[in-house]
Image (cartoon, rainbow, N blue to C red):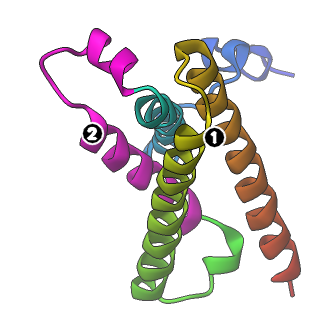
Amino acid sequence: MSSESNKVTLCDKLGLKPLNAQNVLFYYAPAQGLLSYTALSVNVMNPSLVLRIFPKRDITNILLFNTLLGTGLYLYNKPHLAPLPTKEKLLYSSFGAVTFSLGSVLIWAIIRSVVPQNVALCTACGVGSGLALIKIGKSYVATVDELAKP
């Protein structure tokens, strides 16, 4: 074996993928969308907390945009959409991203209306429900991918 094949890169040590167009679009952008989705859950469930961090700027639209982009790219690259023409992949991945993201916002708004107005409780409910929705969504997409295999 050559010394080249034995090298462990910093990316390998950190569990990250190397920087290339494929990984930026379909690994890092969805990961960043996941972070934005989590921040969006806090923003919807506890807007006063986010206003304390960003007092001069409403970041809701920025978080929503990043969530939509990350979710859309995640769905676009899934195996069950691979055989489709690009236009259909764009349409279906966009529909999935919008439905998931805005559905989540609606769920958080409903939860917020029934949860006592406590900063810690609202934040925990937002993040917890967001993580649960991500887990369910990821499981659903994995099931669809599995069922779509030839």
Q: Is the residue under label 1 in contact with that under label 2 (CB below 8 Å)?
A: no
- Res. 73 in view: no
Please identify the quarter of the rendering in which residue 147 is found: bottom right
Q: Nearer the viewer, mark 2 or mark 1?
A: 1
The residues colored magenta run: 47-76
Q: Nearer the viewer, residue 92 or 42?
A: 42
Q: Nearer the viewer, residue 13 or 86?
A: 86
Q: Which residue is at 49% across, 28% downward?
A: 42
Q: Which residue is at 60% across, 43% downward?
A: 111
The correct choice, above or below, for 83 with respect to 16 in the image is below
- Circle 1 residues within 10 Å: few <14, some 14–19, many ≥20: many
Q: Mark on residue 43?
A: none
Q: Circle 2 sits on which residue?
A: 62
Magenta stretch mostly in which secondary structure? Answer: helix
Q: Which residue is at 80% across, 16% downward?
A: 6
- Tag 1's secondary structure? helix
Q: Is residue 121 left or right of residue 50?
A: right
Q: Is residue 14 left or right of residue 101?
A: right
Q: Circle 1 sits on which residue?
A: 130
Please identify the quarter of the rendering in which residue 50 is found: top left
- Tag 2's secondary structure? helix
Please identify the quarter of the rendering in which residue 36 is found: top left
Q: Amino acid at mark 1?
A: Gly
Q: Specify the farthest residue to the left.
A: 56
Q: Is residue 78 left or right of residue 31?
A: right
Q: Earlier in the sequence, mark 2 or mark 1?
A: 2
The question of residue 63 being in magenta is answered with: yes
- Res. 99 in view: yes
Quarter of the C terminus within the rendering: bottom right
Q: Which residue is at 46% across, 75% downward?
A: 95
